[in-house]
Amino acid sequence: MRREISAPRPDFEARAKEIGFHYASTDGDLYWDESARYVFSPQEIEDKLERPTRELHALCLRLVARVVANDDLLRRLGIPPFAFDAIKQSWARRDPSLYGRFDFAYGGEGDAKLLEYNADTPTSLYESAVVQWFWLEQMIARGGLPKGADQFNSLHEKLIARWREISLGRFLHLSCMSQGVEDAGTIAYLEDCARQAGLRTLALDMGDIGLDGPCFVDRQGRRIDFMFKLYPWEWMFADAFGRAPALLRTRFVEPPWKMILSGKGMLALLWEMAPGHPNLLPSYFEDDPRAASLGDRYARKPLYSREGADIELIDGASKTRGPSDGYGAEGYIRQALCPLPDFDGRRPVLGGWLVGDAPAGMGIREDISPITSNRSRFVPHVILG
Amino acid sequence: MATPRKQFGKRGIKPPPVITHAPEGLAGGPTPLAPTQMRTLAITLGLLGAAAIGVFAAAQAHNRRENCAPPEGSNPDGPPCQSSGSSSGHGGSSGWSGWSAYSGSSGNSESSGHSGSSPSGRASAVSFGGFGHAGAGHGGGGGE
């Protein structure tokens, strides 16, 4: 694995516009950055990223089976008791998952280490699936990359196939907080994949979900039976409709059982279940006496933190803190410190995508900060060799 | 014999479809129907529609009894859907301060007075705005 300088396409803006990529910059800051690229060998992808993604997914499913059978563990994860039924029922039915993303620390040596699992509402999907693929195709066509260059990226076709597999002919609603350009873009992309799979769809804002007695409905009065929501379960349950019986009736993507995996508490439970796993870091709930074994080198993560917010990296006397966003009252875990690799001052996090049960691709975000946040830049990758 | 190199992302010669602007349905799908075919289809649909009205009336009566069956019908152990808005029986609260109470009709929600095509055919007030508040201060629900 290496980071290389890469010549940006001179017509990038026009190309981005052609494919509806509207958030190449956010709030004036560059987000999509093709002035560099990460280069991998096929063996690195296969052995260090693809295989761990598959193995960790299997481990996660075993963990869910263990947690749903034990209310103490559900409580340990900070899940409110009134949510237990929805979670257990969705697991008992095996409500299908569409996708997820494991975030790894990996720099070309040793094993990739799982930092967290974005199991519920992962983004950077469109840029992973489509924008970097166009980049690859166009770079090859222009001679900027050799003809045999490849990319760990079968996201697009797998998403379409997965929609076809899990839809069962149902009408699909897709919902998010639509004022966010990235969230709206993610929904637009997933809606398009669903349509290419033959589904009938409607996208709507979270505020446009109506409650009609025992059912959720849209503004047209259409019953919401099957819904993709880019809105985390802990927020769903915290909202006014979070205890509505309709929540047990609608089938959601991602399903409620994914809440077990989307919080940081699962990292402690995974380590307890598979101590010493080469892709896991020692992790403990903060009030667990075993957390002291990490000494003074650990990451302190709120159970429901998002986008690096309120995360602290403790390295002896040195402390680095992510942006503040009010998380932490729900509790913390401590995870053995695993600094991101440093490539000329840039620190990449490797997002290993999963669609259904299959590893499906990779997206890389890098930052000059040791904590990756929603300000980090997306950098494309290529497989050579 | 050499093993062919594994390919991780080869989609063929052409790039994937342009996504957010793609037309509905599958690329290379069926071509539009000719006018004569459309006329035949309209007549057929008219006949089917008349039959469907009868079936729908029967379904209405069934719906009033069942109100709300699980959509796939694959969950015989699933919950009844006619609860009046009470919680699921677990009254506790977690250590996190973010969970709100559900009161049957949201304190934050608007009531539309919508009385249209409710699935059971009954006139009812629909409440909107019961989702979206927990994330309002965090700038969107995507990303983790």
Image (cartoon, coloured by chain):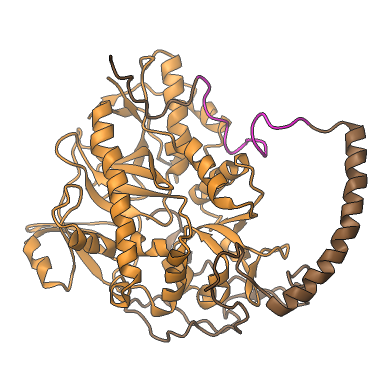
Highlighted range, magenta: B13-31
What percent of the width, then of the height, locates residue A249? 57, 70
Q: Could you say which is closer to the camera, residue A239 or residue A284?
A: A284
Side (left or right) of B18 relative to A379: right
Using the image, determine if residue B113 lies above or below residue A349. Answer: below
Q: Could you say which is closer to the camera, residue A174 or residue A24?
A: A174
Q: Quadrant of residue A217?
A: bottom right
Q: Quadrant of residue B49?
A: bottom right
What percent of the width, then of the height, locates residue B128? 63, 71
Exactly how many numbered labels are in the figure? 0
Q: Residue at x 66, y 29 (%)?
A: B28
Q: Residue at x 78, y 77 (%)?
A: B123
Does the segment drawn in magenta span residue B28? yes
Q: Chain letter for brown? A: B
Q: Could you say which is closer to the camera, residue A130 or residue A41?
A: A41
Rendered-image quadrant of the C terminus of chain A? top left
Side (left or right) of A355 relative to A335: right
What percent of the width, then of the height, locates residue A346? 24, 37
What percent of the width, then of the height, locates residue A317? 7, 58
The overriding secondary structure of the stretch rendered in magenta is loop
Using the image, determine if residue B3 lies above or below residue A285. Answer: above
Q: Residue at x 40, y 33 (%)?
A: A153
Q: Chain letter for orange? A: A
Rendered-image quadrant of the N terminus of chain A? top left
